[in-house]
Image (tube, rainbow, N blue to C red):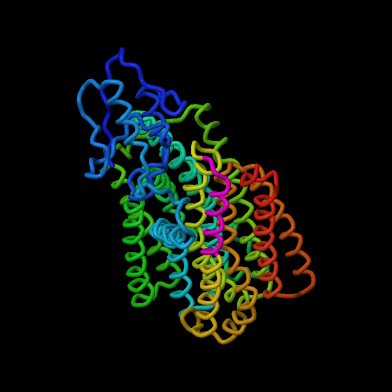
Amino acid sequence: MQLRALTLPAATPIPNIGGLQLKRSSSARSAIHRLSPLKLHRPGILPACARFRAEIVLDHRPNENSAIHSSASLSGADEQAEFETVDAADPKRDDLSDRSLLQQMKEIVTFSGPATGLWICAPLMSLIDTAVIGQGSSLELAALGPGTVLCDNMSYVFMFLSIATSNIVATALAKKDNEEVQRQISMLLCVGLGLGVSMLLFVKFFGTWALTAFAGSKNAQIIPAANKYVQIRGLAWPAILIGLVAQSASLGMKDSWGPLKALAVASAINVAGHVVLCTFLGYGIAGAAWATMASQVIASFMMVDALNRKGYNAFSITVPSPAELLQIAKLAAPVFVTMMSKMSFYSLIIYFATSTGTHTVAAHQVMIQMFSMCVVWGEPLSQTAQSFMPELISGANKSLPKARMLLKSLLIIGLILGLTLGTVGTCVPRLFPNLFTSDPMVIQEMRKVLVPFFFALAVTPCTHSLEGTLLAGRELRFISLSMFSCFSVGTLLLLLVGRGGFGLPGYWCSLVVFQWARLFLSMGRLISPEGVLFA
């Protein structure tokens, strides 16, 4: 496929073809800009948008109409032949939604595969912390529970900044306005830096208070170790959020390999740091914190450098105006509510688990890190839905039957992936618990929650597919309200389980209810007559 402009004289009329009056090249350009950049570069996925193809000219092939010319002036007959050739059926131009179910599923896996690495690096770092610390001290392993809440779970709260960055940068790029792209990046970097410094100061002055309030007086023995971990990792907050903006800007430019390389290097450094500082030098939880913090700073620098290599100045900072901050809030508020509800519920489970004793919270720390490591494998399905669904739901090539077909493919993949993740995620702590801890009491507590662990994990990829479709259909209000409702009901259930003395298995059963409620609410909305797939 080649794109080149046809030079038409100002007085040359553009013919009416098939009852459709074609517009000038400016309209064609705007239509081309509205196409997904991914599909313009991936062979075989170019959407059929014949009515906008005044500027699209196929490569000359022996069997095609030879009336295609590159002359500066075309006669009306030549123009007619030109447009007829462009609109001719081309089997290589099939959209993803036009393929068979099996081909569609294969294409989804190919598309979402590289994005998986971006999601698994963060929980992988925390899982490394858990595995290394668990070999040395059950007390420090328990301290990782509240410690990771302030470090890892809090970072998910700032996903609203990631969503806003990708959206704003992609919109500016669609206008081919590089100055606007640079200005938006500079503004968002300023927001990220400000939030990062705020989090650093919060951890510095209120870290001990937050940990004490979270862990409770019954677990005062784990507060010093948890605070040591939080204070060291808190030094990386500015770098973390600047790196988040740089990563999201690259994704907005359709570059996933740059951030993936940065996170791969960071993970390798994290592993090496744990081996040296914890295994050989015996620094324990402090060594794990230094290794993770250093890897996060290096990853942030590499993401900023990758952005600079694209021709943008990632060291330029611009203070946003109140109107620009309001625009970010409008884009990010529903996502913020959704992420806060989800992360708050996960954090509440840890909070209730800490009241059951050191061995129980240590077992929960292992299982929740395994859960976090596995659950992110379903996130690319949500991203796939957000990338492919909009044009089928409300775009120029709107086709609700094709949208439902695409969702069917996503759900089939999600079902297979969920069963696989549930099986693998359950077998690892069941068959190889010594990878995480050698304490027999901790291992015994881990095995008590394997059944609810499986059911909570197996349903998650399908839930991501459904929620991604809702986001693609701009059902932001519904998804934020439904997630908040799940959080409210889940919190009430946790209170009842805690008072009933059901222990850690009861808390994990509450997580099962939370996950399945998300599935049924999202599915109910999508299959309803008022849903985006039928309205």
Determine which quarter of the picture holds residue 279.
Answer: bottom left
Magenta-drawn segment: 398-414
Image-quadrant location for residue 364: bottom right
The residue positioned 46% from the left and 30% from the top of the image is 320
- Tell me the quarter of the image containing the N terminus: top left
Q: Position of residue 473 (x, y in %)?
A: 58, 43
* Membership of 190 in magenta stretch: no
Q: Is residue 406 magenta?
A: yes
Q: Position of residue 308 (x, y in %)?
A: 28, 42
Q: Residue at x 55, y 55 (%)?
A: 407
Quarter of the image with the C terminus in it: top right
Quadrant of residue 39 in the image?
top left
Viewer-side residue, 296 vs 476: 476
Considering depth in this image, is 34 or 303 the residue closer to the camera? 34
Q: Is residue 255 left or right of residue 485?
A: left
Residue for point 27% across, 26% down: 78
**134 and 261: which is toward the camera:** 261
Q: Eyeballing the image, is 517 above or below 72?
A: below
